[in-house]
Image (cartoon, rainbow, N blue to C red):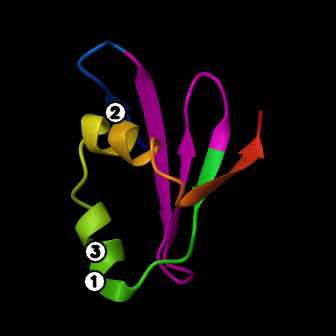
Amino acid sequence: METFKTLTGELIKVSSNKKRRHFTIVTSTAKFRTAQMGKYEFELCLTYTANDWKHFLRTEEYYIVKK
């Protein structure tokens, strides 16, 4: 699990599941999981920064695992 810090100081923890090609994202408010991705998209997300993940959470390509 990698821990990122956004420009606003928010901590985001991200772990990847390479077999299922999805990510689990943990913020201070909830735990999210991405939908399964294609190989190219998954590998692209491996290079994301904290602000990339924050922007990703504004989309609807994930679901809440735990609040």
> In the image, is residue 21 above or below residue 44?
below
Seen at 57% across and 69% down, the residue is 35
Local packing at callout 2 (Cα closer than 10 Å; few below 14, some 14-19, many 20+) is some
The residue labelled by disc 2 is 4
CB-based contact (under 8 Å), mark 3 and mark 1 = yes
Camera-side residue: 1 or 47? 47
Camera-side residue: 46 or 53? 53
Question: Which segment did they paint magenta?
Answer: 10-31
The residue labelled by disc 3 is 43
CB-based contact (under 8 Å), mark 1 and mark 2 = no
> In the image, is residue 5 above or below residue 63?
above
> Would residue 55 be found to the left or right of residue 67 on screen?
left
Q: Secondary structure at mark 2?
A: strand
Q: Please state the horizontal and vertical placement of residue 25, each as a whole percent of the image.
A: 53, 46
Disc with the residue nearer the chain's start (1 vs 2) = 2
The residue labelled by disc 1 is 40
Cα distance in 3D space between marks 3 and 1: 5 Å
Total marks drawn?
3
